[in-house]
Image: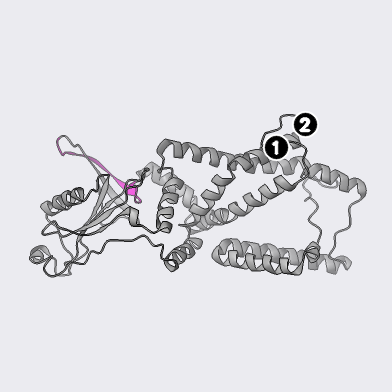
Amino acid sequence: MLFDAPGLGESERLAVFVNPGNAQVTGELVAYGSSGALPFRTWLSRLHANLHLGDAGRNYSELAASWLWLIALAGLVLWFTGRRSGSRWRVERSGGARRRTLSWHGVLGTWVILGMLFLSATGLTWSRFAGANVTELKAAVDWKTPAVSTALTDADHAGHEGHAFPGGEVDPAVYEWTQALQSARSAQLDGPVELAAPKKAGTSFVVSEIGKAWPTQADSVAVDPMSGKVVDVVRFEDYPLGAKLSRWGIDAHMGMLFDLVNQILLLIVAGTVVASVIWGYRMWWLRRPTRGHALRFGRPARRGAWREIPVLAVVGLLALAVGVGLFLPLLGLSLAAFVVIDLLIGLYRWRKDGTTEPSPPSPREAAAEADELLV
C-alpha cells in the first residue's frame, strides 16, 4: 500500500507491505512515481532520466532524444539512396570489414527505425523543455487527460465538519476509506486502484484505476466521504484520442503496456541503438583519413553547396528548422551552435587563404573517398 507521508521527496511515497492473511505490516520502503517503483527500479529510472546528474543529466537525455529521430531518419534516407549493390534488408557477411560494419549498422537500424522514433517521441513528452511544449500543445487541441470533479454540494457533505481541521484539511475515518473503495468497486473499477483523500472540507475521495497493462483500465470516480455515493465518473473510453495515445505511449515506453513482450521489444530496440552507435564509431575508425595524422578529421561537405538548391526549398527548410527548433529547444540551440561553428570555420579559412572553399581532392582521393563511404 502506497501512502503520502511527510518528509518524502517529489513523487515519492511510502510503500507499506501488509500480510493479507493477518493484516500484519511486514516492512516499508520509499517508492517513486505512479507505478510505485521500489529503490532499485527507482535508481534505474533516475539513471535513465538524468544519469544521476540532476538537471544537467536531464538536459543531456533530452538532447539525445531530440536528435534521435532526426539522426535515425537521415540515416534511413542515406541507406536507401546511397550507391550500394547489396540488400538493404539483409546483413552482408562477405566483403571487407568496412562493408560488413556498414551493413550491420544500416540493416538493423532499418528494422528498428519505428522503435527508435517511438522512443524519441514518447521520451520527449515528459522531458524538461520539449515536454512543456507538448503539454501546451495538448491543452491547445483539447487533448488533456480528463479528471473527475471533486467539489461537493452542501447537501453532499453535510455533517462532514466533525473531523475537519481548522485549516480546512480533513482526516477521513477508516470506514470512509473502506466505503470509498467499495463504492468504486460497485462502479466497475476492477483493477488496482489508488485512493486519494479529500483535499479539504467539501471535496470528495478520488479513486482511480492505475493498472498499466493492456487493455487499459484507467477509469476514475469521485466518492462522497459521508454517504459513499459516487458523484462523478470519468471512463477511459471517453478520453480524447490524444490523451489515450499519450497514456499508451508512456506505458509502452516504460515496458508495462504488454508486459514481457513489451520489455523484450524495448530490449531489442535499445540494444540495437547501442550497437549502432558502436558500429558508427567503428565505421569512422575504419575509413578515417590517416595521411599526415592518425586522428585527422575526414573531408567535410563542400562549402556553399546550399546555393545550388532552389530558393524555395532553402526557405522551406529554414522555416522547418526554426519551427522544430522552437518546439524542441535543445535541438534548436545545438543546431544553431553547429551553424555558428561552421560560419566561424568558413571565416577563418577566408581570412587565412582568401577562400571559404576547401582545396578540391585529387581524382585518386575522390575515388578513395567514394569507396570508403560506400553510400
Pointer 2 residue: 95
Q: Secondary structure at mark 1?
A: helix
Q: Is residue 52 visible?
A: no
Q: Which circle's residue, 2 or 1, is located before the other in the chain? A: 2
Q: Nearer the viewer, residue 294 or 67?
A: 67
Mark 2 and mark 1 residues within 8 Å of each other at the beta carbon: yes
At 33% from the left edge and 61% from the top edge, which residue is drawn? 146
Answer with left or right where residue 33 lies relative to residue 319. Answer: left
Residue 31 in magenta stretch: yes
* Residue 335 spot, x, y in % from top left: 65, 62
Residue ranking furthest to the top: 94
Say how many tags the image has: 2
Q: Magenta stretch?
A: 22-36
Q: Secondary structure at mark 2?
A: loop
The span from disc 2 to disc 1 (Cα, nearest Å) is 10 Å
Pointer 1 residue: 103
